Amino acid sequence: MERKLSMNYPENSEITLRIMAGKVKWVTDIEKSVLINNFEKRGWVQVSENEDWNFYWMSVQTIRNVFSVETGYRLSDDQIVNHFPNHYELTRKDLMVKNIKRYRKELEKEGSPLAEKDENGKYLYLDFVPVTFMLPADYNLFVEEFRKNPSSTWIMKPCGKAQGKGIFLINKLSQIKKWSRDSKTSTFVSQSSKEAYVISLYINNPLLIGGKKFDLRLYVLVSTYRPLRCYMYKLGFCRFCTVKYTPSTSELDNMFVHLTNVAIQKHGDDYNHIHGGKWTVSNLRLYLESTRGKEVTSKLFDEIHWIIVQSLKAVAPVMNNDKHCFECYGYDIIIDDKLKPWLIEVNASPSLTSSTANDRILKYNLINDTLNIAVPNGEIPDCKWNKSPPKEALGNYEVLYDEEMAQSEMPDRDLRSRSGQPIGFKGNRARDTGKSGPLTWK
């Protein structure tokens, strides 16, 4: 039987310290095997949060405490964490929309070609979030919009919840009045005064495969916001509903038809525990290439990459770009039947629970590749490094956008020219608008 070193004896504690010297000391408050197996594989040493640690994979609740004015503490150069202090600027549904709206307005003020609009006043390049209002704040604006198209369906989501909790669909104003309107004051009052909601135009013409609605879960790693450097994980997946889609108003309450969240679908009678209602992005790509053609499929994926980079650029100015931080986001994208992608939301803590064997392998590899970029060579981190890993360290990640590279390689670019492939990002931004568009993502 292996004898454990006792910490009570000075000579033993010295031996222990010598063994631990030079090894990354890790902490996590998320007990997931895909995390712990990755730490142990590297020979890292587990410590408690009260001891000296180098790497802390923490929940969003804990990150608040680490960076809070009252309870926070100063991180040293050999400590890194897996969230930016105010990640919620991107990952809270209401703040994401607010920041994207602000970003568009700023580009418009600057006269940027990115903010160009068509004859109906729609953005040519930045129309990637469904029409959205905050409730209660924008209630009157929402009513005005609703009355323009009274047959439309809208989706209500609590701002601070995940996994499909608290979501419902409406197609009549009375449904909101009944739910949360105080008839005496005629003002919108949410059930809990603390709880804010967003209401978005529901994408009621989703692309269907096998008659079922699905969305894309894509993983995006940000190592720094200023300059922006982000990576796309190649092994994303589609999440399918278990029940065939119908836009019929009689099925508005059936979440097995409308919400792709595994947390909801796994309770359905038709949920498949072997494949978990999931399909790889590479399978989706092959399917679309064979049914719609290679060109439109490439255009779709270029537009998805464009959406992600623009959403990150929208929040970069307000993000606290702390050198101790990196973040792996779960992007949720829906594709409509015209092959237009829509950004639905961004998750700060994408699920690390494995619903199938393939899921477990994917998430283990995701964490492995994330750690290889965030903690080079598995050595004690140094916050002062330039956060530019060599290509061979990327694993299944690929550079999506590198602002420094874009600036250094194209100092004199003409934004309105389409003469060449943009530098500093993956893919080529092209829309069939018949107009000249921006050359670069910057």
Image (cartoon, grey):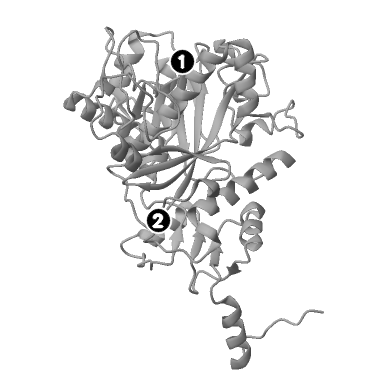
**What amino acid does circle 2 point to?**
Arg
Position in image of residue 360 (x %, y %):
69, 44
Position in image of residue 288 (x %, y %):
60, 16
Q: Farthest bottom residue?
A: 10
Q: In the rendered view, would you say 276 is above or below 429?
A: below
Query: Would residue 68 be found to the left or right of residue 338 on screen?
Result: left
Choose the circle earlier in sequence order: 1 or 2. Answer: 2
Pick whichever, 342 or 220, lies toward us.
220
Q: Which residue is mark 1?
A: 153
The tally of labels here is 2
Q: Which residue is mark 2?
A: 64
Q: In the rendered view, would you say 174 is above or below 365?
A: above
Position in image of residue 303 (x %, y %):
44, 23
Pick whichever, 127 or 377, lies toward us.
377
Identify the residue shown where x is 55% and y is 33%.
217
**What amino acid does circle 1 point to?**
Thr
Q: In the rendered view, would you say 387 is above or below 175?
A: below
Pick whichever, 163 or 156, lies toward us.
163
Identify the residue shown where x is 61% and y is 60%.
39
Q: Is residue 379 visible?
A: yes
Task: Kindly identify which numbered label has been placed on residue 292.
Answer: none
Query: Would residue 72 be found to the left or right of residue 256 on screen?
Result: left
Give the number of the mark in front: 1 or 2: 2
Q: State which quadrant residue 214 falls in.
A: top right
Position in image of residue 382 (x %, y %):
42, 64
At mark 2, the secondary structure is helix
Q: State which quadrant residue 134 falls in.
A: top left
Query: Would residue 118 be found to the left or right of residue 128 on screen?
Result: left
